[in-house]
Image (tube, grey):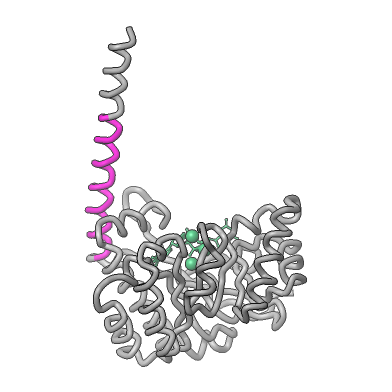
Amino acid sequence: KAKDFGRNQAVYFSQTLDTEIKNKVRLEHKLRNAIVNEELKVYLQPQYDATKQKFVWAEALVRWIDKDEGFIPPDKFIAVAEETGLIHELGFVVLRKVCWYMQTYQEQLSAIGIEGIAVNISARQLFAKNFFEQAMAIIGEYQIEPRQIEFEVTESLLMENAKQAVEVMGQFKRQGIKLAMDDFGTGYSSLAYLKHFPIDCVKIDRSFIKDIPEDKLDMELSSAIIAMALKLGLEIVAEGVETQEQSAFIHSQGCRLMQGYYFARPMPIEEVLLLASVKA
Ligand code: C2E
Ligand code: MG
Ligand code: MG
Ligand code: MG
């Protein structure tokens, strides 16, 4: 009967919701422990300059390998960290580690070509009280030049408080920290962002790159994004470049900087230091 079905459905939903909440609480608890016990690792994915034919920069990506569950992808726990406020602690852990890498391995990274590291910053961090002061204090503590650090911010959350975002980003920019708009093209009003936010660089989202050359529309879209960014005098990084063909096309459209498995996967810094700088 329909009524029974409806009731069962409700029971079913409340059970799924219950499991979901339990999973989230469990994940939160585990993540808190992982942060406290210093179990989070920070990998680096080198970025390649197709014109200079060498690596020039790298992006820091947090890695969590749990003793029981193994590799837990950031897409699974960053959202939980944002919801629970753990993102603040996590963000400082990553920034500290990056500054330590720069301080300790500066010469070796530079010999490969890598002059700086990009750090992903959640809009939640950007909006937190004293984030600017705390971040600058860490950068200062490790005696890192601000121009060796870039903050990547994803456009989707920024509009919640665009005015404040512009303000805090401006503070960093005046210190010489570079700013990138991450996952560009996936938000709702990308063009407005470009006009208002004090950014140096846009990162073309992987979704525009991954089906090149089969998807002709994606080819048109990515070259339009590149043309626009070039006109605005912004740097452009193509994300998720996996093939020689994709690299050649993107480069032919005027984008020099590439990040993707074709050039290098995210890896521990020890492996980055073993990289040869030139890829044929
Ligand atoms: P993102 O910042 O857009 O980072 C790029 C993602 O694309 C990374 O996923 C990277 O491993 C992946 N990737 C790079 N090249 C390729 C490729 O050629 N093919 C494919 N299929 N994927 C590629 P990852 O490491 O899983 O991170 C996912 C997202 O989690 C990041 O996206 C970023 O938004 C977030 N994230 C990672 N680390 C941090 C962090 O320390 N703090 C914050 N707030 N967010 C982070
Ligand atoms: Mg990023
Ligand atoms: Mg991205
Ligand atoms: Mg992303």
**Is the residue 256 above or below the residue 106 in the image?**
above
Give the camera-side residue of 56 and 112.
Answer: 56
- Percent x, y for residue 30? 25, 54
* Residue closest to the eye, 33 or 83: 83
Camera-side residue of 116 and 70: 116
Query: Is 167 part of what is drawn in magenta?
Result: no
Name the outermost residue toward the top: 1
At 54% across and 72% down in the image, what residue appears?
A: 194
Instruction: Point out the image quarter for the C terminus.
Output: bottom right
Residue 105 against residue 63 in the figure, above or below: below
Q: Position of residue 34 (x, y in %)?
A: 27, 61
Q: Main secondary structure of the magenta part?
A: helix
Residue at x 35%, y 86% (from the top left corner): 139
Magenta span has 26?
yes
| Left or right of residue 90, residue 173 in this image | right
Q: Quadrant of residue 236?
A: bottom right
Looking at the image, residue 115 sits to the left or right of residue 28; the answer is right
Q: Position of residue 5 (x, y in %)?
A: 32, 14
- Tally of marks: 0
The answer to whether residue 191 is left or right of residue 96 is right
Quick one: quadrant of the N terminus?
top left
| Residue 273, position as x, y percentages in the image | 53, 79
Instruction: Classify residue 260 by image quadrant.
Output: bottom right
Q: Left or right: 83 with respect to 246? A: left
Compared to residue 18, the image places residue 2 above or below, namely: above
Read off the magenta span: 14-35
Q: Residue at x 75, y 53 (%)?
A: 216
| Res 39 → quadrant | bottom left
Q: Identify which residue, 187 or 92, lies in the foreground.
A: 187
Q: Against 33, is 256 above or below?
A: below
